[in-house]
Amino acid sequence: MRPLFLSGLALVWLIAASAPALAAKTASLDKADISALAEDPIWLTLLHYQPKRLGSGYTSQADDPDFFFSERGKTSPQAEMSATLAAIRQSGGGDEHASCRFPARDRWLRSRLDLPDRRADCPAYDEWRETLNTEAVTLVFAASYLNSPSSMFGHTFLRLDPPADDSSTDLLLANTISYAADAAAHDSELTFAYRGIFGGYPGITTIQPYYEKIRLYTDIENRDLWEYRLNLTQPEVDMMLAHAWEIRERNFDYYFFDENCAYRLLALIDVARPGTDLLEEVSTHAIPSDTVRWVVDRDLVDDIHYRPSAATKVSFALDQLPPSDQVLAAAIANGYVKTGDPEVTGLPEERRARLFDATYDYVRYQSEAEGWPREFAAPLSHDLLRSRSRIDDVEPAAEPSTPSVRDDQGHDTFRIGLAGGELGDRSFAELSLRPAYHDVLDPPEGYRPGAQLQFLRLDLRLFTDNDELQVEEILGVEIRSLTPRNAFFSPLSWQVGFGGRRSDTSDDKRVLVPYLEGGAGGSWRLGSQTQVLAMVTADAEIDDDLSQGYDLAPGADLGILHQSPRFSALGGIRTKAWFVGAREHQDALNLSASWHLGRTMSIAAGFERKHHDGRYRTEWQLGLNAYF
């Protein structure tokens, strides 16, 4: 027993003597590694660090002091890592412990460093994860919506899908993660656009049920949804959720062009699967459809599903009716014809069933979207359902088919144009640069027909007769929404734009003047790819070269637009009546066309014949547009 006892004492002495050395070694290793580890791309992504634009070092895009443990954490990855490690090593637990506030940091640091195995108890975080019950993640893209500045380019968010083997699974009840500007409810659209561009709003990450998103996007705003199921593994899904917890109540300033809804979701995917480097694709702007394209190109998508909006479904159902039945449907919906009238009962059963189905869907849609009075819509809906119930053995109408080209498969949004032409008797070469997004003469596939949204386009001209380089136009924003009217829908077509452009003065000079223009009217379809338009317009120009320093002009636009995968054209006449200064009536005949060479290049041509102040002038050009 005595030798055994002495051996035990010796072992205890050796352990006690070596413990400080081992602890010092671990601390030394941590301290030596911390500088290099703080430069790890995963750590930089977790803290949203980006290289400084001027000088060396980093700055975090997080704008909330509570996101950092170190006072220097905003600009020092090393200081924030040291402070995070110190906080994680503190004893205790509960929801305010560092491991509970920042579970993604805790998880990654434990995978890289020899930290204590004991992890703090985090009841709030664990309950949150259990409630979300997420097995897979789906990236959802909501199509563009021109009536809202925040959604002109579309919108993206993440759906958190529960286990697929659960028989009670209903994806409508799944939760979503979304990032958006925390705008005041009373802010106007112009205020939102201004503050969104220049960073006047905090951005917030929110969790909402998917059915609420569907109601907003598909039922109210009439936007189709595309669902891209990501091929993330369960550990990657868990890492994404851990980081979503970290940022869910933190402020990240919202910027309309770059640090927007799509940008924050790219960061979550980069955290979930290190090495995807989706944020590296972002330069001056992050357009949602572009970001979806990057996700698809990185082979991150397993499956794609199309969810048409309520308006798409109703329009499709009505379009499937014969023309005579469409007239009947409009008459029934407006109360001019009853479901029991002879012109309805005389139809074959299958046509009557289709007529009742389409008309009921239309009435229900108008009640939701347009606020038709309940005292009118409810009895009519009941009458339609009762009449439909009397017809057996007729299957429901088919759903809209999936578009052959998705929004992320349309042309890239950055465009460069090179052209040559003549203005009067002067020849010129023109360079056009447009960072975003689309006009009606670009390849139309993947974009809304009749929709145009251009930002920050610059047109430069070099006149060959005297080698004079001029700015022809600086386009700030140009929006055009042409939605055809018919017997069922009467949308307003409209346009608005501002920037600087060359304008003719009364003394025959062309000067660059700031302008603001707008218009409203209607458009009507001629076939499946062509529409005519008529608008009342208003223009304002401001410049010292104008006789009064400014000028105003009411006017009108009449035109015809054709859009197809191979060829697009826009032609018409435009008239303006300047009435403040010395200028007179201005009329123009114009025709522009593009021959699309796939979705990456177009041959563009334009012609204009203008009459102004008793003078006629012709301008034409021919060039090539490339999309990047």
Image (spheres, rainbow, N blue to C red):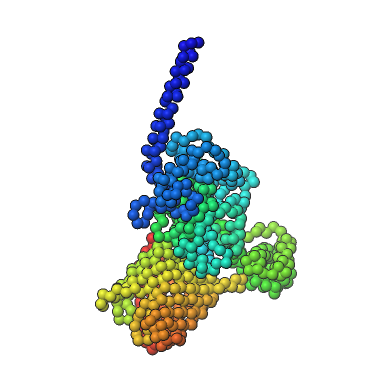
Residue for point 47% across, 36% down: 115
Task: Provide residue 497's location: percent of width, then percent of height.
Answer: 46, 73
Residue for point 46% across, 62% down: 199
Location of residue 297 with respect to 81 vertically, above or below: below
Task: Provide residue 448's location: percent of width, then percent of height.
Answer: 50, 65
Q: Nearer the viewer, residue 100 or 205?
A: 100
Task: Provide residue 256's location: percent of width, then percent of height.
Answer: 47, 62
Q: Does residue 523 appear anywhere in the picture?
A: no
Q: Nearer the viewer, residue 350 or 173?
A: 173
Q: Nearer the viewer, residue 316 or 462?
A: 462
Q: Nearer the viewer, residue 137 or 526?
A: 137
Task: Provide residue 355's location: percent of width, then percent of height.
Answer: 66, 66
In the rendered view of the protein, which quadrant contains the C terminus? bottom left
Residue for point 46% across, 51% down: 267
- Which residue is the extreme one toward the left? 466
Residue for point 44% across, 65% down: 437
Total marks shown come to: 0
Location of residue 16 with respect to 358 vertically, above or below: above
Q: Does residue 291 appear anywhere in the picture?
A: yes
